[in-house]
Image: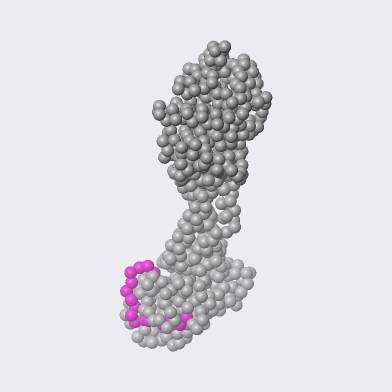
Amino acid sequence: MLDLEMENVAVRYPDLPQPALDLPRLLVPAGSSLAVTGPSGAGKSTFINVITGLERPSAGAVRWKGQDIARLSEAARDRWRARNVGLVMQEFHLFPGLDAMENVLLPARFRHPRLPAGFRDRAAHLLAQVGIGTGRRGVETFSRGEMQRVAIARALLARPGVIVADEPTASLDGESGAAVCALLTALAGTEGATLIVVTHDTALSGRLDRRIVLTGGRCTGDSAMEAA
Amino acid sequence: MIRFILADLQRLQAGAMIVVLLVAFATALGMAVRIEERALRLGSARAADRFDVVIGAPGSETQLVLSSIFLQPSPLALVSGDVLKQLSEDPRVDHAAPVGFGDSYHGYPIIGTTAEFIEKSGFRIEGEGRNFSALSEAVVGARVPMAVGDEFSPQHGLAGQAAEEHHEMSYRITGRMEPSATPWDRAILVPIEGVWHVHGLGLGPGEEGYHDGHDQHHEHDDHDHDEEHDHDDEHGEHHIEAGHLGPPWPSDMPGVPAILVKPRTIANAYQIRGDYRTETAMAVFPGEVLTRLYATLGDARLVLTAIAIGTQMLAGTAVILVTMAHLSQRRRQIGALRAFGAPRLAVFAVVWSELLIVIGLGVAAGIGLGYAGAKALAILFARQSGMALPVTLEMSDLAFAGMLLAVAALIAVVPAIYAYRQSPAAALRG
Ligand SMILES: Nc1ncnc2c1ncn2[C@@H]1O[C@H](COP(=O)(O)OP(=O)(O)OP(=O)(O)O)[C@@H](O)[C@H]1O
Ligand SMILES: [Mg+2]
C-alpha cells in the first residue's frame, strides 16, 4: 500500500509553449482511489507516465511512500515499477501466441530468470477471480472484455502497492466495461492497493473515492476540494 | 523468455521467412562460389598432376590439354608419328605414350594408348584384372559400367555422337582401373594400334584383311600414313608384327593427336618442352596451361564473388530495413514490455536474439543450400566429364559462415540498440 505525494511537478516538451503537465501539489493517500478526467490532450497520459516512472518530469518530486522516483535512474525506475505498479492500459498489450496464464506471468519472467515459487498459483488464482479459465488457447482469440480482464490479472500478479489504469474501459462495450470497472475497484480493495484511473467513464469514476479534472496540464477540478 | 521469443517469432513468421530466405540465398551463393571454385581447382590440378608434358600438333594449347588430359572430344590436328618414336627413344624420357581418340562405346571414349602408359602413369588395375596385351583387349576406367571379361564393339564417332557399331572389331575387357577421380575414369583404354586399325591408319598385326570395311576415312587421314597401297612394297619393316604392341615403334607410323610424356627429371622436362616447340610440334606443361586458364576463369570468379558479396550486402540491408520497419510497428509492444517492468537489457536481448535466430537459420539453410548446390553441379559435371570435383565443406567454409553470422550479429545490434533506447512511455500514447 503506497501513498503518493507530488510536488511542483512539471513536464515540458521542447515544442510546446506551456507545460503538458503542471501540478504544484497532489496527495493521494495509501489505499484510496482517484479518478482523473479531462479533455483530450489535457495531460492525463503524461500524468500516468510520470507517476509510474515511465517518464521523468522536467521538474518536481514524485514521492511514493516517501521515495522520489523522479530522481531514480531509468533502470531503477524500471525495477521500482516492476515491483510496485500494476498497469492496465486502454490497448491491453497482451502478447499473442501465449495463453492467458503465460501473459499474466510474462512481466515476472522478464524479471526473474526462474519463476519464483507461488507465482503460478497466484496467477491461476487471479485468473479465476477475473473469470478467465486457464486454457492453453492463445489470447488473440479472446474477446476484448476477456483481454482486459487478463490484463487486470497481470497487473495484480506482483501484489503491487498501486494500480494505475489509463482508460481501461474506453475500448470496451458497456457491459464488459462495467465488468472491468467492478473488477478493478473490487480487486484494488481486496489487494489493498492504491487505485489511480484515467477515465471518461462516469460509471467508473463514480465508484472511486475522489475525482480530479485536468485541463491544459493543470488541475482544474477536484472533488475533494469541492466537498471541503 | 524463450517461450516469449518463440511465440513472437511465430507471430512474425512472414517477415521472419523473408529474412531467412534472403539470408539463406545470399549465404548459399557465397558458399557455392567458394566451394565450386576450390573443387574445380583441386579436381583439375589432380587430373593434370599425373601428366608432365603434353605434345601435340601446333594449335591451341588449351584445347590440347583439355583433349588429352580431360579427354574432351575435339578434332585435334595430328602430330607426326615420328615425334612419338623419337620421344620414346629419347634417353631423357621415362616414357611417352600416344593418346588417340575417335571411337566411343555408349558415350565412353575409347582411348588408344600403350600398356606401358597404364603401368607407368599411376593408374592401378583393380584386383584380378590385368593390363591389355593384345589388340583386342581393353582396360576400362572406374566409372565405365563394364566388368572384366565383358566384350564390346566400339561405335564409330566421338563420344556423345550417334554411332554405328564396328562389328568387325571387338574388345574384351581384361582389367579395370582403380578410381582416379579424373576424366580417365570414364575412358576405355585400348592399344593405340587398334584405334589406328579401326580408322584405317597404319597396320594391325600384318594381316591382309585388316583394312576390310574401313574405307570411311577419318579427317585425319590426310596425313600420309595410310598403308593401304604400300602394303606390298619394300617398307615391310614398318608393319607392326603380329602380337607386337607399343614401342619400339616402326619408323613410319601414323600420327597421333597427343603424346603424354614423362621426362626423367625436371630439367629434362624443360629441355623437352624447348625441343618440341617447332613448326610441327607443340609441347606444353599442362599445369601451366591450367594456371593460365584459371587466370581467365579468375575474372569470372571475381564477377561471381562480387555478385555474391553484393547479394550479401543487399540481403544485409534488406534485413536491417525489414527489422527497422518491423520495429517501429513494435514500438508499442516494446514500450509495453518496459511499462510492465521488463529491464532495458531484456528488451535488447529479445530483439537481438530474435534477429540472430532468424539470421542464424538463414545462414544454416544457406550452408546446406550452397553445399547441395555445389554438389549437384559437381555431380552433373562429373557425369559429363568424368572429372570428380571434390566438393568439400572445410573449416574455412564454416569460418566463412561464422564470419557472416558474426557480421549479422553485429548488424542485429543496431535494431536492438534502437529498441533498447526506446522510451517506454510510447506504450501509453496513441
Ligand atoms: N513526446 C512528446 N513531445 C511533445 N509533446 C508531447 C509529447 N507527448 C505528449 N505531448 C503533448 O502533451 C500533451 C498531453 O498529452 P497526453 O497524451 O498526456 O494527453 P491526454 O490527456 O492523455 O489525451 P488523450 O485523452 O487524447 O489521451 C498533448 O498536447 C501532447 O501533444
Ligand atoms: Mg491519453
Quadrant location of the C terminus of chain A? top right
Residue A30 position within the rendered picture, expressed as x and y whole percent measured from the top left: 61, 25
**Please, what is the dominant secondary structure of the magenta stretch?**
loop
Q: Position of residue A125 (x, y in %)?
A: 52, 40
Q: Position of residue B292 (x, y in %)?
A: 54, 58
Tell me the residue at 52%/20% (across/down): A36
Q: Residue at x 52, y 16 (%)?
A: A213
Viewer-closest of B60 and A11: A11
Residue B161 visible somewhere in the drawing: yes
Q: Residue at x 53, y 36 (%)?
A: A154
- The number of callouts visible is 0
Determine whether B180 is above or below A210 in the image.
below
Q: Which residues are magenta?
A: B159-175
Q: Is residue B166 magenta?
A: yes
Q: Is residue A160 left or right of residue B29?
A: right
What residue appears at the point 37 percent right and 76 percent down from the top-left corner? B154
Residue B58, visible in the rendered structure: no
